[in-house]
Image (cartoon, grey):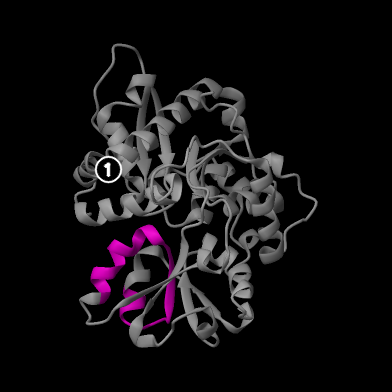
Amino acid sequence: MNISGIFNWKSLLAEKLLIAAIGVVFCFAAPTTAFSKDKVHFQWSWLPTGFYCPISGAIAKGFYTDVGIDLSVSTGRGSGDAVKKVAGGGSPIGDGDISAVMSARSRENAPVKCLMHIHDHSPHSLFLLKSSGIKGFKDLKGKTLATTAGNSHRNYFPIAARMAGLDPDTVKWTVVDSTTMPAMLVNKKVDGVPYFTSNISFIKPQVEARGDELVVIPFADYGFDIYSYCIYTRDDVIAKESDMLRRFVAATQRAWIWAKDNPEEACKAHSKQWPDTKYKDNLAGWLDLRGNMFGKDLSRAWTGKFDMKRVEKTYGVLVKSRDLDPNFDVKQVIYDSLLPK
């Protein structure tokens, strides 16, 4: 899907879209402080999977109230949708794949910039059924995959496919709502769906309940190595509320580092705040993401700061896969100077 075809931040800003229209908003109970707190909304790009255990854990522990922030969150329906909402004024802060931020800024001059990265190793993958007989990318010729509008997997698929020796144009894509993707896979309405590897524990039981087995094909298996998720904001928020952003990224950095060493506590807090999710699935999801951030042995240092050479490499992949302007200055999408030194 062409992101420019779905992205219109100017009209969204003019219409002043309500946050309540884009997801369920939760305000979490946390320890209170004596001073007045800034009410800040954080637009998530996806459903409340284990990916977000660190944030829920940090809210429960009071990391945000410690820095004078009363944080609320909304679930999302994909990176493209979340970027559109933040750029349009629906929320000051969001998360999503850096490809959506780069595409929006390059094509539409959307006023969004990344404050920090979440993981620097791509967790992108395809989920398929063993009964389909698909074992690798080359087996996807003539098949149909389902994804959400603006999904980063769709952005990167052409590059990963070529790395695997597959002509990406031989694969058909259909755009669906995020909530229907699991059912479309298990009911064999499509041949596969893209997810982060952290969603294995969420999808696997649904597949096994139908007597099948889940097959996961990571893009990284074919040499796909770029930045993935980031947390971003708008230009006007940087200009007017830099102090709030500085406190937010400090608390969020603290959240991820704390959850590295306290996965069970973080995911118990997340499961409590999102009772429709399962603790076991949340924990498995966070442990997978943790490996992408800190390395499987947890020895990799992580701060959220960007390496500009890696940012340029990431944009170079997008230029090839999404036909973006090769002369675009990628510095326009990075603003990580608010992170703690």
Residue 294 in the image, given as x and y percentages of width and height: 43, 44
Answer with left or right where residue 82 lies relative to residue 51. Answer: right
Is 112 magenta? The answer is no
Q: Residue at x 59, y 39 (%)?
A: 306
Location of residue 305 (image quadrant): top right
Q: Which residues are magenta?
A: 183-207
User: What amino acid is found at the position of numbered circle 1 in the picture?
Assistant: Pro
Front residue of 130/248: it is 130
* SS for dot 1: helix
Front residue of 4/331: it is 331
Answer with left or right where residue 25 lies relative to residue 9. Answer: left
Residue 115 visible to the viewer: yes
Residue 295 in the image, given as x and y percentages of width and height: 43, 48
Vertical side of 153 occupied by 311: above or below? above
Q: Quadrant of the C terminus?
A: top right
User: Which residue has dot 1 on it?
Assistant: 263
Vertical side of 308 occupied by 224: above or below? below
Residue 186 in the image, given as x and y percentages of width and height: 31, 78
Q: Quadrant of the N terminus?
A: bottom right
